[in-house]
């Protein structure tokens, strides 16, 4: 069975890689369009009516879940593409909806597409998509976790327990409320994108803080966080940061 698809991912490189893999490994999938903008993605879905949508979860304008919520009757199959967010994966698995973890493995891609084709034939997408939206609605922030790749494997941590993230030579050192720091191979930019919708703020090019762990702001331009962590605030970000706190 040949099917049509569109790709939505805010990262240009990830989008190009995914498109290339689909064209090489899934010849029965015709790509109707791709975009880095979830807002444009909504328009493409309405205009092109694809049978399958490859959808990134963490995007700055709106998340993949927020996009899905804006569609009244999402009758297309979805394969979510994510680099983290176990909270999301739990919800997706519960509804038998496909997902791929970045970097996308060729075999996983082929398996996910084949499952999507079977689901398209069964015409079960609308029911599953509505169930997913319902499940996401009852999740709480406290239950959300993210996956952090480390030298020893993958660590699953609660977002609320992260005090702040510090960029160190392309890596990120993550400080926690209840256990020792952890070093991730991902950059501070990766975590800024991942956590920007969860009350985190990039106060300095090398420091991403959890707003819920602020204990004091010093006039010299620094913050005292939980466990007496002291973090600098960039001059060019102080005004906006203080306005954010006042809100």
Image (spheres, helix red, strand yellow):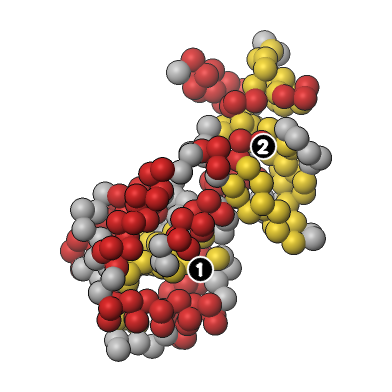
- Relative vertical location of residue 5 with respect to residue 208 in this rendering, above or below: below
* Pick the front one: 223 or 12: 223
Residue occupying the point 56% across, 59% down: 83
Residue occupying the point 65% across, 25% down: 213
Residue 65 in the image, given as x and y percentages of width and height? 38, 51
Residue 47 in the image, given as x and y percentages of width and height? 18, 64
Counting every numbered tag in the picture gives 2
- Which element is circle 1 on? strand
Q: Does 164 sit left or right of 131 as displayed?
A: right
Residue occupying the point 79% across, 60% down: 151
**Residue 122 in view here:** yes
- Relative vertical location of residue 100 with respect to residue 56 in this rendering, above or below: below
Label 2 belongs to which residue? 162
What's the mark number on residue 88? none
Mark closer to the chain start, 2 or 1 = 1
Label 1 belongs to which residue? 100
């Amino acid at each position: 069975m040949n099917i049509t698809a569109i790709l939505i991912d805010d990262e240009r490189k990830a989008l190009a890689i995914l498109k290339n893999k689909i064209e090489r490994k899934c010849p029965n999938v015709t790509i109707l369009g791709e975009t880095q903008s979830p807002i444009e993605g909504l328009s493409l879905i309405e205009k092109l009516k694809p049978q399958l949508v490859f959808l990134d979860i963490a995007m700055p304008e709106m998340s993949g879940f927020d996009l899905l919520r804006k569609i009244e009757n999402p009758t297309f199959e979805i394969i979510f593409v994510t680099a983290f967010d176990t909270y999301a994966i739990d919800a997706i698995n519960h509804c038998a909806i496909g997902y791929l973890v970045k970097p996308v493995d060729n075999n996983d891609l082929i398996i996910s597409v084949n499952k999507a084709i079977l689901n398209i034939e069964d015409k079960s997408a609308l029911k599953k998509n509505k169930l997913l939206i319902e499940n996401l609605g009852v999740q709480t922030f406290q239950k959300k976790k993210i996956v952090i790749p480390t030298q020893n494997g993958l660590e699953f941590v609660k977002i609320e327990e992260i005090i702040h993230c510090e960029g160190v030579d392309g890596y990120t050192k993550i400080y926690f409320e209840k256990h020792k720091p952890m070093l991730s191979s991902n950059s501070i930019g990766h975590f800024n994108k991942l956590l920007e919708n969860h009350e985190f703020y990039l106060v300095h090019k090398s420091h991403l803080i959890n707003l819920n762990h602020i204990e004091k702001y010093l006039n010299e331009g620094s913050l005292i966080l939980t466990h007496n962590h002291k973090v600098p605030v960039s001059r060019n970000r102080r005004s906006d940061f203080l306005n954010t706190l006042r809100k």
